[in-house]
């Protein structure tokens, strides 16, 4: 059985969890307090970050190469399209959410509201929270732009781009930081993603001290 060292609300861990679950790869989840810099964990990943995946006798770190490896080692069901241009678009959007969205939104909302308390780094910086709340509007509007023209974010079929976006948004939805009323098309897209069997463990997450809102696990939110 594979083992994933993770933290529940990490969007990077969630992206890997979704990929594993979609490909029906049985996996044990182990919560890792990476900020404590445990010696055993640092041997698994000297960078001191999650996710870390142990699978098939290998230990791998960083969500992007992990997901790429899973796609090559376990190609069915595929989360990448066949065409070169289509694969580029998936990778572009994965990078968009894991870089731009992460830096502008996730870091300013989730990390300020939750991670600082969990890791003992103090209280949220209100200026950062305000910035994140403003920036997410732009990203939801961009997703609306894409979904008005496509069935899924990167094209006509669900891909890793959708899982990358859903990983970030689900983490923020856990703390009620997504205005689903801003875009019906984005809300409908998330409802489709949320209803997939791969999402079940995500919706079952519980973080001590941070209970999710009632709509978080509701498939008809």
Image (spheres, rainbow, N blue to C red):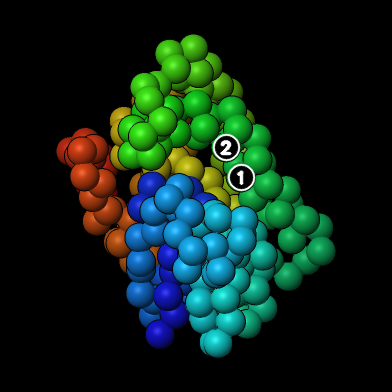
Res. 38 image quadrant: bottom left
- Image vertical order of residue 100 relative to residue 132, above or below: below
Q: Which residue is mark 2?
A: 102
Q: Secondary structure at mark 2?
A: helix
Distance of label 2 from label 1 (alpha carbons): 5 Å
Q: Position of residue 82 (x, y in %)?
A: 73, 70
Res 69 quadrant in image: bottom right
Direction from residue 122 to residue 106 in the image, left or right: right
Dividing the picture into quarters, in which one does residue 102 lie? top right
Vertical position of residue 100 compared to residue 73: above or below: above
Q: Could you say where residue 142 lies in the image, as x and y percent from the top left?
A: 61, 31
Quarter of the image for the N terminus: give it.
bottom left
Which residue is drawn at the image coordinates 78% and 66% (left, top)?
83
Q: Are marks 2 and 1 in contact (CB under 8 Å)?
A: yes
Residue at 39% from the left image edge and 53% from the top image edge: 33
Q: Can see residue 147?
A: yes
Query: Circle 2: is it few (<14), some (14-19), or many (20+) Cα within 10 Å?
Result: many
Report the label total.
2
């Amino acid at each position: 059985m594979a083992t994933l060292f993770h933290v529940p609300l990490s969007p990077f861990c969630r992206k890997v969890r979704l990929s594993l679950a979609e490909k029906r790869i049985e996996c044990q989840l182990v919560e890792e307090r990476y900020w404590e810099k445990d010696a055993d964990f640092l041997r698994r990943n000297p960078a001191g970050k999650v996710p870390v995946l142990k699978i098939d006798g290998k230990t791998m770190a960083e969500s992007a190469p992990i997901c790429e490896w899973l796609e090559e080692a376990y190609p069915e069901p595929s989360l990448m399209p066949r065409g070169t241009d289509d694969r580029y678009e998936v990778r572009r959007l994965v990078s968009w959410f894991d870089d731009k969205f992460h830096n502008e939104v996730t870091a300013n909302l989730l990390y300020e509201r939750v991670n600082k308390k969990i890791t003992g780094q103090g209280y949220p910086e209100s200026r950062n929270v305000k910035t994140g709340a403003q920036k997410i509007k732009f990203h939801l509007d961009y997703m609306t732009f894409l979904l008005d023209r496509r069935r899924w974010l990167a094209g006509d079929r669900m891909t890793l781009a959708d899982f990358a976006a859903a990983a970030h948004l689900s983490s923020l939805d856990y703390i009620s930081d997504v205005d689903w009323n801003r875009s019906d098309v984005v809300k409908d897209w998330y409802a489709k993603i949320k209803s997939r069997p791969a999402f079940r463990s995500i919706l079952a997450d519980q973080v001590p001290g941070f209970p999710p809102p009632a709509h978080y696990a509701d498939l008809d939110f």
